[in-house]
Image (cartoon, coloured by chain):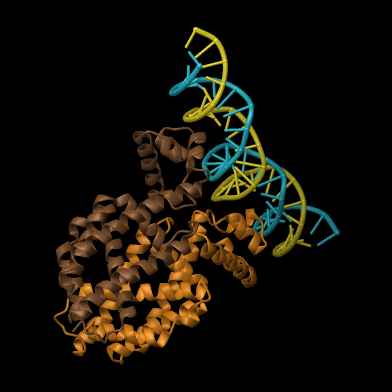
Chain colours: A brown, B orange, C yellow, D cyan
Amino acid sequence: MKPFEKLSEEKQARIMNASISEFAEKDYETASMNTVVNLAGISKGSLFNYFKTKSVLYDYIYTLALGEVKSYLRKVRDETAQLPFNERLSKIVDSGVIFITERPRLARIYFRLVYSGDSPNRKIIVKELHTMSEEYLGNIIQDAMDRNELDSSINKAQSVFFLDAVLNRFLKEYHEAIENGNHQYFDRKEWVKGITNFFTKGFS
Amino acid sequence: MKPFEKLSEEKQARIMNASISEFAEKDYETASMNTVVNLAGISKGSLFNYFKTKSVLYDYIYTLALGEVKSYLRKVRDETAQLPFNERLSKIVDSGVIFITERPRLARIYFRLVYSGDSPNRKIIVKELHTMSEEYLGNIIQDAMDRNELDSSINKAQSVFFLDAVLNRFLKEYHEAIENGNHQYFDRKEWVKGITNFFTKGFS
DNA sequence: TAGTAAATTGACCAGGTGGTCAAATTAAGA
DNA sequence: TCTTAATTTGACCACCTGGTCAATTTACTA
């Protein structure tokens, strides 16, 4: 049993909370173990006892963040399996917005990871996320094609790419709006409608 | 006259080259003035004489990078003013690809700036870029609407957003492919065709 | 209660950072 | 050539980093 797992729930939570805060606020290189230690109210030696190095702690944190993102996505995919494409898309965007609103720090770690930063293993993680998203959105597009909601002659790989680009960008923008306290100017419903419209009907 | 401008062209170029390399390779916090000094083959005191602080040097560099990007975009916009929407879009993507290929380090600084990092003034710069892109792509969409190439009932702001999201994401992906030596697997023409198709005809 | 094992601490380390400034070097003018 | 002014240098500073480990505190057992 790993030392960290032997700790009381309360102490584990305190350390997780501190680490999430620090890695959400600063990128990997700039985030400081000293800050984590101070936020968590434990000694430096302890933290390095629970997590051998900074990069091991970071692994733990982003795995947690990605796990939450994935389980959210899985849930919404399964719950909407019977819905038509546009409603499905709309639910996916909605659930993204909800996740961002409820877990802004985890969302920030996620965006930091995919959009930048030089964290260890970044390339591997990003590639994994890439194939994951390809499979996820690919399924949803395929379903829509099977139901004749989308023209089955479209280039699926490219469609996935466009969908992924727009969804991620939208969620990133929404996330920044929340962090800057401007999300009240964001008419979420209008955007969700626009996105689904765009992907079903295009610009024409 | 600023001290830096009094230097010989050769020396200025050496310092610029060193700075661009360092800020392209590492983000603002991690980039090191010591490394710049060593790469440029000058003393630390000199560098801080030319640029009062690290952030002043960074300002100089990213202003240069953005300036190059802007002039590239302006050029292609003016040169394609008479072309139909799809050809215009295609030229814009092409010129983005060319820029990335010819100036990969400046491109990297650009992507680092917009997609992440915690450089000084980041928010201000990103906001400025945002309005710039809004105006740029907005014009191009408006032109297409005026010529009845696009339905004039579409939501222009949203269309700009989608266009911006897809173009930026594509160029970022292409840039990473180049840096990883994988761009030969990227069928550029196929993608350019796909993008223009998508924006003129949608998924249907 | 005494003794032992496990968990926790924080002073300490080597190495790096951005930035400074007296001293040395170079350039310019008479 | 001598003098003065401008430029360049690098040792040095305070501060911060990830990581270590002997010493202390805590928990447990007999």
Q: Which residue is drawn at 38% across and 69% down?
A: A131
The picture places residue A84, in percent across and down from the top left corner, at 15, 72
Quadrant containing the C terminus of chain B in the rendered view:
bottom left
Q: Residue at x 31, y 59 (%)?
A: A70
Disc tally is 0
A79 up-or-down from A141: above or below = above
B111 up-or-down from A109: above or below = below
Q: Is residue B114 shown left or right of residue B198?
A: right
D5 up-or-down from B135: above or below = above
Image quadrant assignment for residue C22:
top right
Q: Is residue B27 shown left or right of residue A81?
A: right
C10 up-or-down from B62: above or below = above
Q: Is residue A69 shown left or right of residue B102?
A: left
The picture places residue B25, in percent across and down from the top left corner, at 53, 63
The picture places residue B139, in percent across and down from the top left corner, at 26, 80
Res A116 seen here: yes
The picture places residue A124, in percent across and down from the top left corner, at 47, 63
Res A93 seen here: no
Quadrant containing the N terminus of chain B in the rendered view:
bottom right
Q: Which residue is drawn at 36% across and 66% down?
A: A132
Image quadrant assignment for residue A166:
bottom left
